[in-house]
Image: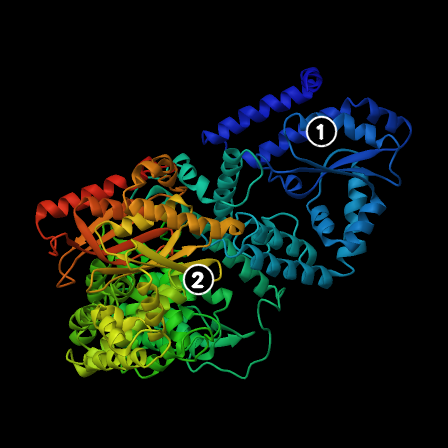
Amino acid sequence: MSERKLKTKDNPYLVLLQDSRAELILNFLQGNEPDFLQKHANLIDDYFRQSYENSQVGQKLVINQNPYAIIALGGYGRCEQCIHSDVDVLFLFMKQISNDAEDLIREILYPLWDLNLEIGHAARSINDCISLARNDFEVLTSLMDARFICGSSILYSELIEKMQRGIIKRKPKKIIDWLVESNLERHRCFGDSASLLEPNLKEGQGGLRDYHTILWLSRINLEIRTPRDLEYNGFFSNDEFLELKDSLVFIYIIRNRLHQEAGRKCDKLSFAYQIKLAEQLGFREMGGQKPVERFLGELHGKMEYLKQLHLMFLYEKRFAKKYFHFKKLQKSSNTKGIIIIRDRLQFSSATKIISSPVLLIKIFEESARLKLPLGSEANRIVREFNPLIDSDFISSKPVIKSFENILLSPAPNFNVLNEMLRTGFLECFIPEFKELVNRIQYDQYHIFPVDKHSLRTVQAIKKWALNLNTEADPLYGDIYKKLKNKTILLWAALLHDIGKGKEGSGHARRGAEIARQILIRKGYSIMDVETVGFLVENHLYLVKTATRRDLYDEETAIFCARHIKDIERLKMLYLLSVADSMATGEKAWNSWSASLLRELFFKVLKILEHGELATSEAVSIISSKRDEIINSGSTNLARNELETLFNIMSPRYRLYMPAPKILEHIILYKKLQDLPFVCQSSRGTPSDTRVITICAKDSPGLISNIAGVFTLNGFDILDTKVFTWRNNIALDIFKVKAHRDQVFEDEKLGRVNMDLQASLTGKLDLGKALNEQLDALLMVDSQMVREPNRVKVDNNSSSFFTIIEVFTYDFSGILYVITDAIFKCGLDIWIAKIATKIDQTVDVFYVRDFDGQKVDSADQVKEIKERILKVLPSISNQKGCNN
């Protein structure tokens, strides 16, 4: 290595490149180098030119009449040289590669590796290049970006001429089809970068490769030489080209800074780098948005523009039949001034819009009716004429009727609202919506920006009208079709997150007031206005109740029914809750959350239909279970003993535990006798989980002891159900992840038994045993901005219990540290609702003090909050947090 460093010092051209690169990169990082890509490429060009001029091997080749040229390829050829991008070069020879080529490459290229540059190189003749490019279009696109650096320029010119004449001119269609298919595959693989929280800056849809594809296609079929020719030849307007240039500059700034932070070539903007880049680029908190949220919002806006420009180019030049369906359609517009050209809607004349601005929404209404998108020129015209959308326009009854038709129109393949958003029409029609555009919620829970999430929520509901989502519960479509006023539900879906555009907490309540103002402005009735306001304000109500409250307790459903009051409202709120969760992402919507929400919906529906006294059904269910258990004959117990045991079980346990499980638990209970506890385990669903049922004599701190023992032995708790019988017997059912070392799982479960017995009999100090692990347990993976931990104490939702809600982040041992803190507050846990379904958890505990009373004094509530918060991870101290 010392010898190589010595060679570096002895090579003045390399030293110059090293020093110049360091200075250029420093200037760029300080924000003083707007032409970094070009200048970076130029510095490397200079090194090659100087090395060429002074190459001893090169002079030998010239003497032997074997001239060569050094050609830049790929991104280096386009002069898009990022900090750690590959430097791809071609040593081009006329007919044959000299025997001295290897020495030449070693002489010129090897020193560059000392600078940690990634060098991609090849030595080929012109014919070799053409042959490879003809059979491998990856090679062809690299050559299409070729740029002459130094050497024999005649070789470069001949290569380009042969490539054009021998490949591109002969089979343009085949090349274009390959480019388009590669595009589709790339988008499928890397996703839509314009929406993802961890976008791929290069390969994702809306990434740099979309721009490169535009260049390649234009060079193949349109004979475009430079990017600016796209404007000069009328493919892009001046505004479009300038916005494209602005978007590329921003994306490349981020890509270079990402390279610098990662210390290598890197295109995925992962959470680990986002906060730091936002700080480097000078983003500040504003309007309730964190710097990183504003940074990602601007990036998404740039990438969305690049994505749309790419799609527009493909369509306008008819390059991509796989993207668009080019076919003659027997459709015509019903609106004068709107025509169909090549299965796209266009204005017959832009001047007609001045005298009839209603055409601006009519074209979207026709798009929804005919299932045809707007043409590129129509999109441009809408953007240019958006200033005509004034207060009279947005409150006009014909305009509002058209918008209602758009909302109600089924949307099997595309959502017209997306085009209204992209053209800026939607934010002009609903000015408050502007604050949602590209607004990021920086967590691992919300996948899409708020504006796109809102439109996806509407789309989810509209799909139910056609039963298009085969994976969805048919119940949603059945309910939707029978709604009396679907328009109101769709308005609520569109506006359910409108409150997130304003600073502060409580977006649902704030959004309800904004939604009311919007609908009043548009002339809706007081009843409709209040219904939308109610739906917006309560769009999280059912989900929170289903996941944070005890559904086994009839009081939960009664409380919901009293709050909602009306069956039609309940149905709309249920559909809105489902659509909102579906549009959020898989961490918000899965079989677990779907089943809880469905169960709550039907419980509340029955109460609203039959009244609160409809508990006769519950009595009937319990009576039926009693008969099934007494007459089962599957135990050795007498009928009267079974009946006695059944009667001492808690009402919520008897109501919701299936009869076969009750029989299992009775058998387990009979094994208890004088033991402190007994337990059994079984394989859960999914198969990598285990269900462990523990029957024990109830005592304060039991849940904490069990949770601590699981943590001590490396089992992560996913869920738990806690039941207490009237004879002071606790039946606690835990769902845990299968042990990571399944070969020794039985041994570990045996260890759980031993440790729990020792803990319950006072022979094991759990706190001391866990002390060494706790520091590691409380380290939360915090690449993202974290919201502070919160503890909420609710004395209103239950008549018999105080409900403690703990908002924190999932980590191994979470249940132990919380339940231990609750026990030390002198509280007994009667019901626990554990939900480690997403990174941010909400764990809920129904508690009483040791005297069986609710906890309602201010001092007690304060102590509960302080004690629990004290044992939770300090989020503000985690890496990458600015809270």
- Front in this rendered view, residue 872 or 507: 872
Give the vertical position of 671 relative to 140 (above or below). Answer: below
Q: Which quarter shows the C terminus?
A: top left
Q: Which quarter shows the N terminus?
A: top right
Q: Residue 629: where, in percent of width, then height?
A: 31, 77
Disc 2, SS: strand
Residue identifier under label 2: 682
Residue pictured at 67% horizontal, 43% vertical: 74
Q: Residue 224: where, in percent of width, then height?
A: 65, 52
Give the vertical position of 51 relative to 827 (above or below). Answer: above
Query: 690 left or right of 767?
Result: right
Query: 88 left or right of 255?
Result: right
Q: Please name the amino acid that badge 2 sits on.
A: Ser
Residue 606 visible within the image = yes
Picture disc at residue 133: none
Disc 1, SS: helix
> Splitting the image into 4 quarters, where does residue 281 fall?
top left
> Splitting the image into 4 quarters, where does residue 178 fall?
bottom right
Q: Residue furthest left?
A: 857
Residue identifier under label 1: 48
* Dot 1 and dot 2 residues touching (CB under 8 Å): no
